[in-house]
Image: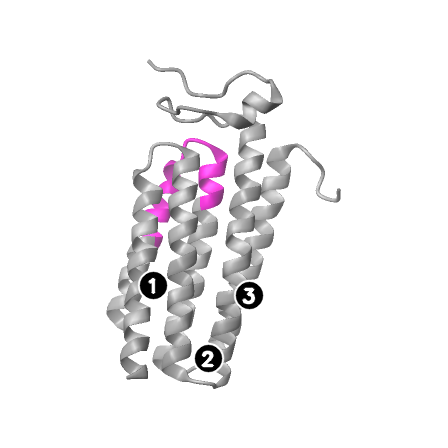
């Protein structure tokens, strides 16, 4: 039973990770890509590490896998948030169909939405 | 297990495309960050497949190093120095 749960968790994790990477290729601008990639890859990596834990039990491998899952769950969203804020200030353009840009509205600077050509 | 590792490697290839192609520097940064996380999960799967429990330490180390690197680049883009 635990064995089967471990396999299911591994497969779900790998599926989410690959879908997140597909989003990284397909989405139109930086912020959409970052959203797809970080969410899916965080969940996918946690699934993979949980699967490793379920299949190896309370050994050195399993407990360290759980630690790694906890670390990834905390650090990847923090890094993505910092990078998104840095690129907004740096001036990376938003997608041209963007509806609302509250960050530059609050700062009162000029809009960074990409021009429609 | 081998199939899962190969599928994850295809995901890493997608990230490599974005890292080579990406229009802005942040695209490359986030692609390399995601690629490091994927390598960390591949290392965990290899550790599980061949019963090598010391490889999971490498997995944690890859995650730590990629986090620090991405944070340093984000601070640089924001226009602050690294120590404030």
Q: Check the image and report above or below for B7 versus A5.
A: above
Element class at badge 2: helix
The residue depicted at 60 percent of the width and 47 percent of the height is B71
In which quarter of the view is residue B46 placed?
A: bottom left
The quadrant of the rendering that contains the C terminus of chain B is: top right
Q: Chain of mark 2?
A: A
- What x and y, as percent, mark residue B79? 66, 32
Q: Which mark is residue A62?
A: 2
| Residue at numbered disc 3 | B61
Real-space CA distance between mark 2 and mark 1, rounded to the nearest whole angstrom? 16 Å
- What x and y, as percent, mark residue A63? 50, 79
Element class at badge 1: helix
- What x and y, as percent, mark residue B13? 32, 51
| Residue at numbered disc 1 | A13
| A15 left or right of A49 in image | left
Span of residues in magenta:
B12-30
Of the pair A53 and B64, the residue shown nearer to us: A53
């Amino acid at each position: 039973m635990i064995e089967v749960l471990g396999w299911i968790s591994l497969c779900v994790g790998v599926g989410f990770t690959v879908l997140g990477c597909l989003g990284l290729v397909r989405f139109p601008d930086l912020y959409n890509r970052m959203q797809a990639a970080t969410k899916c890859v965080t969940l996918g990596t946690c699934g993979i590490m949980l699967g490793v834990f379920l299949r190896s039990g309370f050994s050195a491998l399993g407990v360290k896998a759980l630690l790694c899952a906890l670390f990834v769950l905390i650090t990847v969203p923090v890094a993505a948030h910092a990078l998104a804020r840095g690129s907004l200030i740096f001036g990376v353009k938003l997608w041209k169909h963007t509806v609302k840009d509250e960050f530059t509205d609050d700062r009162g600077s000029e809009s960074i939405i990409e021009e429609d050509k | 297990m081998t199939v899962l590792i190969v599928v994850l490697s295809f995901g890493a290839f997608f990230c490599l495309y974005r890292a080579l192609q990406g229009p802005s520097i942040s695209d490359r940064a986030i692609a390399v960050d995601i690629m490091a996380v994927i390598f960390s999960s591949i290392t965990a799967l290899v550790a599980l497949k061949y019963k090598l429990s010391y490889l999971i330490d490498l997995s944690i180390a890859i995650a730590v190093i990629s986090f620090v690197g991405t944070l340093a680049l984000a601070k640089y883009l924001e226009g602050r120095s690294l120590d404030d």
